[in-house]
Image (spheres, rainbow, N blue to C red):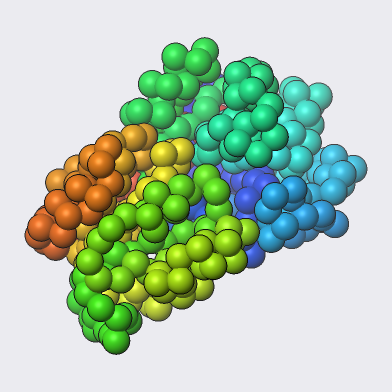
């Protein structure tokens, strides 16, 4: 099995349980990579839950899961007639696609985006070791599994995952840039400590909101934990979702992006903030350890990380972000794909 010949267009089918209208790193990654590949001449189709009847995901009602996708998926794949197939997630659609590929003898690749085992354990008390065993079995059938950072690839290898390839992430430097107004948080006391993303238990936002810091804590995003956190921390400013230019303004207008998650495998919001010149404060864990470098400060004492990040030059944060591009990320994925039929 060989990678697609350079210059020869491919027809790539991405199958993902995470897709529009969801707002998360997986969706943004697939959207950005698909856009690049299409511009370079490839055909890219996405099959997501939006094509099926769906039900709310337990604990995440705003996320919809495809209902019995295996009934319709074979016809959809045949009509699209892809040359390459990539399964992005391990949900109902990913499982149905995996079963179909194994039944038809098709080759496929997968990617590992989320520390699903730890999330399941936090909500259901099912031991993470059991979920990790299931995840290892899911990905073992793939020709290759993509992972975004060196730390994640090392962990997957240590847990017995097979052929693991690098698939980094990028940032839209035309949208997320330091130029522009910095008045999104005018009227709030500075410094502005910003968190951006889903307001959910795995994001560990309480660790940020409990910090004794001068100025104002701002939360951009929404999710199941917002009502409880908003009630518990009335001094914090909850701004809801911001998108596009408004999100770039939110990053640029902050003094530090605080990223308290200990479970994210990458953290696109860190790249987006740094591209706007805003340094990052985080724990020294997977994701921040691979992404932040001199663009912020990492410390097990998150308060100390915040204060150190406040002293990081905005030019240093921008320099880190400029090392990443969606063009490089798209080509990295394309180079690791395998033809479905060999």
Count of numbered circles in the view? 0
Across and down, in percent, residue 79 comes to: 79, 49
Give the quadrant of residue 100.
Answer: top right
75 or 7, nearer to the observer: 75
Residue plotted at (53% across, 25% down): 144
Q: Residue 106, how many percent across, how many down?
A: 70, 27
Where is residue 246 shown, x and y percent of the image? 40, 78
Quarter of the image with the N terminus is top right
Closer to the camera in the image, 276 or 11: 276
The reply, left or right, for residue 71 in relation to residue 138 is right
Using the rendered view, name the quadrant where residue 166 is placed: top left
Q: What residue is drawn where x is 15% and y is 46%?
A: 294
Residue 82 in which image quadrant? top right
Q: Is residue 102 above or below residue 84?
A: above
Identify the residue shown where x is 85% and y is 57%: 53
When the figure is inspected, residue 2 is found, relative to residue 331, above or below; the finding is above
Residue 74 horizontal side relative to residue 334, left or right? right
28 vs 183, nearest the viewer: 183
* Left or right of 125 in this view: 260: left
Instruction: Give coordinates of residue 15: x percent, y percent.
Output: 66, 45
């Amino acid at each position: 099995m060989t990678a697609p010949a350079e210059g020869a267009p491919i027809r790539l089918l991405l199958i993902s349980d995470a897709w529009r209208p969801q707002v998360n790193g997986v969706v943004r990654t697939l959207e950005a990579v698909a856009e690049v590949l299409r511009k370079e001449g490839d055909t890219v189709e996405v099959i997501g839950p939006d094509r099926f009847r769906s039900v709310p995901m337990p604990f995440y009602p705003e996320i919809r899961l495809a209902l019995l996708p295996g009934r319709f998926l074979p016809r959809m794949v045949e009509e699209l007639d892809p040359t390459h197939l990539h399964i992005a997630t391990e949900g109902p659609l990913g499982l149905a696609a995996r079963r179909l590929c194994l039944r038809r003898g098709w080759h496929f690749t997968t990617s590992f985006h989320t520390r699903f085992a730890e999330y399941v354990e936090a909500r259901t008390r099912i031991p993470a070791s059991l979920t990790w065993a299931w995840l290892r079995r899911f990905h073992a059938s793939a020709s290759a599994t993509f992972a975004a950072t060196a730390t994640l690839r090392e962990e997957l290898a240590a847990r017995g995952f097979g052929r693991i390839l690098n698939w980094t992430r990028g940032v839209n430097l035309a949208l997320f840039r330091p130029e522009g107004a910095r008045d999104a948080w005018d009227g709030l006391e500075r410094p502005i400590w910003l968190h951006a993303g889903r307001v959910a238990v795995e994001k560990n936002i309480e660790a940020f909101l409990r910090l004794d810091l001068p100025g104002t804590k701002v939360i951009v995003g929404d999710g199941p934990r917002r009502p409880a956190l908003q009630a518990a921390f009335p001094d914090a400013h909850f701004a809801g979702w911001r998108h596009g230019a408004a999100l770039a303004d939110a990053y640029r207008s902050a003094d530090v992006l605080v990223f308290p998650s200990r479970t994210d495998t990458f953290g696109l919001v860190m790249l987006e903030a740094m591209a706007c010149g805003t340094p990052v404060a985080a724990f020294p864990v997977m994701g921040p350890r691979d992404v932040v470098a001199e663009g912020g400060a990492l410390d097990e004492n998150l308060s100390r990380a915040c204060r150190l990040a406040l002293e990081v030059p905005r030019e240093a944060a921008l320099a880190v972000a400029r090392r990443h591009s969606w063009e490089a990320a798209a080509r990295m994925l394309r180079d690791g794909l395998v033809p479905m039929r060999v």
